[in-house]
């Protein structure tokens, strides 16, 4: 066994006990790697061997880079990080929109053997504080436009480097050498923490290895997306989401393609960029595909050949409308932060509209009942998955809930057809999935309860044609406050100021009481009926 390169052993010390890991299927040819592996080297030096230094790698608001220019920038950042005291195993946060510098920093963190922790620009200080505490963050590279919330974190005592806007960081990396000796990490050294919302509102840090990063490219991307070096990628998910990290960074860099990174990827912008850059592979959520449908008139999307949909359930009506309008068969898929990316999907002639697909090569899936007994085809049950990637929470008791009998339980209700296809039915917990974002009901409730007018509150996700689900709050006001449209707007603004704005309740109902059990436990399910 190759020895870990980590000098700081925090990640190693906080991995779950191996008895609690899912069974990992590492025999598939696509997921077989050498014991010594650094994902940054594989995505740069190995790719340059295939396509050369002059091939276009990134097009972004902060500049366009060939693979050679990107490698030089990553090496300069790596040298700077070492000079600032970063050692293998340290946790380094990134706070940035989707741009070239964010990707270069991410690659540099992996290159020096540290652990990348990418945050969402929309997150507020209270949410960032949880990430800092759980991940024990020691360094942070923060875009100059997103410094305020980071500086408001009460429990962060590490080093912060402000990026962009003519900062010292920009000046210092320009002075660094473009040569760097890549840290000789083990394939199973932790490379990143990806945070996922728990249904209780307490985030969980998923821990992924260097080999996991390559695995998602060599399983889902290689077998379903099937990209080539001539493809041009774009999409809307933040690279802090593993859906975005894979689709906009790992998959294109693995094959030497070009990625167009957008700081603003609203549907009208996506349509404009598809035409401008001849985007051929698109990653976004069903909500965005639905929004673009209404704006397709006069737009040139003929360059598209692969459109990937994930993050929320893809309605059959959306699939059909997109196909009729563009001739493109939407590639549906279900993934999880715990498994890093998509594990059930289908493309080309294997697509059956309305069904998610079959297990990606290298993965296995089944549908089980509450006793973990596999159910018959056509019967609803809990989706269980295993493959070359799997759930490893950072020091979290919920590991035993997600991994059962060696399988990952995703929290989704599915059925399987007699042909082996999997069909999404619903979520099995209180997680709200709206426009591709995971939103924990208790977190929104806590934010509302911080307002002086709120006595009690319950938050649920209700079906919505545009967003899939819409965050809905049922609020009991204190006696001295009056229900009104103005009060609803005040509560919505309050939530936006407390937590990431996309989590705010778009619908608020004022009620006299909330449904509870005889012991006083809130019954959210009764509000969904």
Image (cartoon, rainbow, N blue to C red):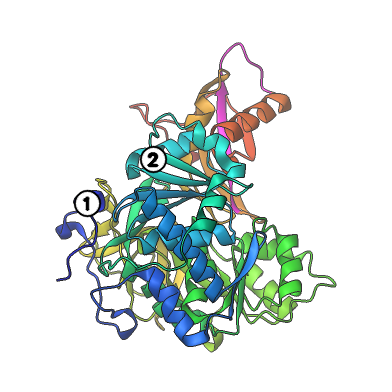
Q: Nearer the viewer, mark 1 or mark 2?
A: 1
Using the image, tell me which numbered label, if any, was put on residue 9.
1
What kind of secondary structure does the magenta stretch mostly adopt? Answer: strand
The residue stretch that appears in magenta = 468-483
Q: Is residue 276 left or right of residue 306?
A: right
The earlier-in-sequence mark between 1 and 2 is 1
Q: Secondary structure at mark 1?
A: loop
Mark 2, other Cα within 10 Å: few <14 / some 14–19 / many ≥20: many
Residue pictured at 57% horizontal, 66% vertical: 314
Is 187 left, or right, of 271 in this rendering?
left
Give the quarter of the image for residue 473. top right
Residue at 50%, 62% (x, y): give it.
104
Q: Which residue is mark 2?
A: 132
Give 95 or 369, whichever is nearer the viewer: 95
Q: Position of residue 368 (x, y in %)?
A: 30, 65
In-image side of 250 versus 275 (left or right): left
Reply yes or no: does residue 482 show up in magenta.
yes
- Does residue 356 appear to the left or right of 305 in the view shown? left
């Amino acid at each position: 066994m190759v020895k870990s390169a980590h000098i700081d052993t925090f990640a190693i010390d906080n991995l779950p006990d191996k008895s609690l890991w899912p069974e990992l299927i590492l025999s598939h040819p696509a997921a077989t790697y050498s014991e010594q592996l650094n994902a940054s080297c594989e995505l740069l030096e190995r790719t340059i061997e295939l396509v050369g230094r002059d091939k276009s790698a990134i097009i972004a608001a902060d500049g366009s880079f060939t693979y050679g220019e990107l490698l030089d920038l990553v090496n300069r950042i790596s040298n700077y990080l070492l000079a600032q005291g970063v050692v293998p195993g340290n946790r380094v946060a990134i706070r940035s929109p989707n741009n070239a510098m964010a990707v270069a920093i991410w690659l540099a963190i992996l290159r020096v053997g540290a652990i990348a922790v990418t945050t969402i620009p929309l997150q507020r200080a209270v949410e960032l504080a949880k990430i800092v505490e759980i991940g024990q963050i020691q360094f942070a590279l923060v875009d100059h436009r997103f410094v305020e919330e980071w500086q408001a974190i009460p429990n962060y005592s590490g080093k912060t480097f402000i990026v962009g806007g003519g900062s010292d960081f920009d000046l210092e990396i320009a002075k660094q050498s473009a040569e760097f000796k890549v840290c000789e990490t083990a394939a199973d050294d932790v490379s990143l923490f990806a945070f996922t919302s728990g249904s209780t509102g307490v985030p969980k840090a998923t821990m992924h290895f260097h080999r996991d990063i390559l695995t998602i490219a060599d399983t889902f991307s290689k077998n379903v997306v099937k990209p080539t070096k001539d493809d041009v990628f774009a999409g809307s998910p933040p690279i802090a989401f593993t859906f975005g990290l894979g689709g906009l960074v790992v998959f294109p860099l693995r094959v030497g393609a070009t990625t167009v990174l957008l700081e603003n990827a609203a549907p009208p912008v996506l349509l404009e960029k598809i035409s401008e850059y001849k985007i051929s592979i698109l990653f976004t959520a069903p909500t965005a595909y639905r929004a673009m449908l209404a704006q397709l008139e006069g737009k040139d999307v003929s360059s598209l050949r692969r459109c990937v949909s994930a993050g929320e359930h893809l309605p059959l009506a959306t699939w059909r409308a997109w196909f009729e309008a563009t001739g493109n068969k939407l590639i549906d898929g279900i993934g999880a932060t715990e498994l890093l990316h998509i594990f059930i999907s289908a493309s080309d002639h294997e697509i059956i509209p309305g069904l998610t697909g079959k297990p990606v090569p290298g993965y296995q899936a089944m549908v089980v009942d509450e006793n973990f007994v596999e159910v018959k085809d056509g019967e609803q049950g809990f989706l269980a998955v295993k493959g070359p990637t799997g759930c490893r929470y950072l020091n979290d008791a919920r590991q035993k809930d997600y991994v059962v009998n060696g399988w990952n339980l995703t929290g989704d209700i599915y059925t399987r057809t007699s042909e082996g296809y999997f069909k999404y039915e619903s979520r099995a917990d209180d997680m709200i999935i709206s426009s591709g974002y995971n939103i924990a009901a208790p977190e929104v409730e806590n934010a509302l309860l911080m307002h002086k007018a709120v006595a009690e509150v319950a938050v649920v996700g209700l079906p919505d044609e545009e967003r899939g689900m819409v965050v809905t709050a049922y609020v009991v006001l204190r006696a001295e406050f009056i229900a009104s449209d103005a009060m609803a707007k005040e509560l919505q603004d309050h939530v936006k100021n407390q937590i990431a704005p996309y989590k705010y309740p778009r619908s608020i109902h004022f009620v006299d009481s909330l449904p509870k059990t005889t012991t006083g436990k809130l019954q959210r399910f009764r509000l969904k009926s």
